[in-house]
Amino acid sequence: MDTEPVKSISWPRRYAGIYAALWRNSVVREMGFKSNFLLWIVVELLWFALQLCFIGVIYLHTDHIASWTKWQVVMLVGASQFIQQLFQALFLSNCIQFSELVRTGRLDFMLLLPMNTRFLVSLRVVDLGGFVNGASALVVMGYAARQLHLSPSAGQILGFLLLCLAGILIHYSLMFLLSSVAFWTVRAQGIIWGYYSFFNIARLPDAAFQGFFKAFFTFAIPMLLVANVPAKLLLNKLQSPGSMLLLAGMACACFVLSELFWRFSLRHYTSASA
Amino acid sequence: MRKYWHVIRIGFENTLVYRVNFLLRAGFGLIPLLATIYLWQTVYRGQNSLVGDYSLAGMISYYLLVTVVDTLTAVNEDDWQIAADIKDGNISQFLLKPIDYLTYRLCLFFSGKIIFTVVSLAPVGIFIFCLRQYMVAPAGEWALACFLLSTLLAGLLQFFISYTLALMAFWLLEVSTIIFMAFAFEYLAGGHVFPLNILPPALEAALNCTPFPYLLFFPVSIYLGQVRGAALWRGLGVQAAWLVFFYLLARLVWHRGIRKYSAVGG
């Protein structure tokens, strides 16, 4: 592995080069099925609209959910969609396909490549439609901000983006953890499907929940932090920086946990084909 | 017909393999349901009045009944399997054998639904038991009987719609986008997300002209006693009419598709 040409480039540049090649591959692949690419964007837009309809219908009958007004919740749903779509663009299909890699034995081939296997497995495919849908979520957020007469400062926007990164890291780590179960049983599809249920929770205002449910989805599976904290930062709803630190801390914890489980599973992995 | 009983038995054996997946699916599905229930509780706590005609217990019962009807009637994997059968050329054998593909798939749908229902019984049952204080009783014996009948019709309607959509695989490379789009409309207009009668009346009336409410909302509203008398019979009639319509459409699309299929397969 330590041959001269490899040594001569630093590792960040090497991995950036690899990632650029993966991007090129994905663009070529998507453009091979243009109409399908566009149709998937429409599908995601429809589901986004559906969530907004639900909020709209609830607010036909009430003017607040706990301390949240209508446009504040729209902002939250937008933030949740933004985070989820970026996660989908970068990681989701890779996580879903992982069990296929194990089943077909293609993983063995990847393990032999002179690079970090988790990097390759997690980032192999980029789903470009996710970026388009992420942009549409930003448009909705912008509209909600106008309705609320918000003009966030540059610091708030920067903070929002950083917190979104933490949210994406949580989605990715938990999903990667779930797909690593494929090492132990190939029939792990049901678990992955289940993670979609959690997305539904991320877009609901945290103030609507209490007791065990709230504690569980804050400290065990931090779905009530992922979108709520970034949205509250923009809405001036954060009283203290505590919840921002909590989100960042949970993101690190989830990532470390998924890495530990990944290494543990790899050590116990005996190829599918042998 | 003996051969179709055989198909049902094969269906049992095939779907039993997926029982763990079914269990996870039914179990995980309850988490967003619980979140929705908490959300409505918070809404009711904030205002002390009804939402539409629903009390808090009525609203929670609505969502629990939606879960029950959905468990009994929703198409799980059938549409993907049908599309795959067409794409992989598996349907060629049905053209040669004296087996009707639609009846064959219907048998598989039934056996799959029975396994799914049995597997879901534990998680859904426990969930409803925990919330039993909110669960209202059916509006009467007749309402319960009509609810069951309407649920059966809803299941068949679900199947014929999914079947017809999956047959688009004769013409298209990828049918999953169409299926997900139809699913989104069904989800909203069928009453999955919220009861349709809390919408503005004009919008509700417009939705009632589509088949979607008859997939889910209609049986649930029978149970809750919101439709009764002449309106109940009219509703059941409309539901049956949609069923016949989609059955005929499924037959028609199949015949068109087969012609196209043989043209390509040579």
Image: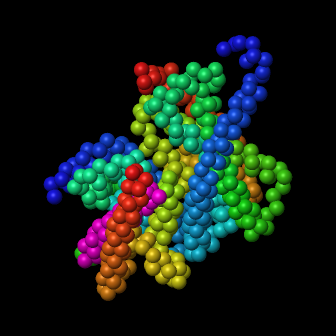
Kindly identify the residue that appears in the image at 75 percent across and 50 percent down.
A160
Which is more toward the observer, B60 or A133? A133
Here the colouring is rainbow
Number of marks in the rendered image: 0
Q: Quadrant of the N terminus of chain A?
A: top right
Considering every residue shown, the one lying at the far bottom of the view is B230
Instruction: Residue at 53%, 83% (x, y): give it.
Output: B202
Q: Where residue A136 sits in the image (x, y, percent)?
A: 69, 59
Based on the picture, tell me whether residue B145 belongs to the magenta stretch: yes
Residue B234 sits above or below residue A122 on the image: below
For the residue pair B224 and A2, the one nearer the viewer reads as: A2
Q: Is residue A109 magenta?
A: no
Prevalent SS, magenta region? helix
Q: Residue at x 64, y 23 (%)?
A: A115
Q: Residue furthest top?
A: A3
Magenta-colored span: B142-171
* In the image: residue A235, left or right of residue B215: right
Quadrant location of the C terminus of chain A?
A: top left
Name the foreground residue: A61 vs B68. Answer: B68
The residue located at (74%, 24%) in the rendering is: A11
In percent of width and height, residue B257 lies at: 40, 61
Q: Position of residue B200 (x, y in %)?
A: 54, 80
Q: In this view, does B46 lie above or below A218?
A: below
How far across and how far down the image is residue B167, in percent?
41, 59
Q: Can residue A243 be seen in this view?
A: no
Q: Which residue lies furthest to the right in this view?
A: A154
Residue A152 visible at all? yes
Image check: A253 left or right of B105?
right
**For the view shown, which residue lies furthest in the left direction?**
B2
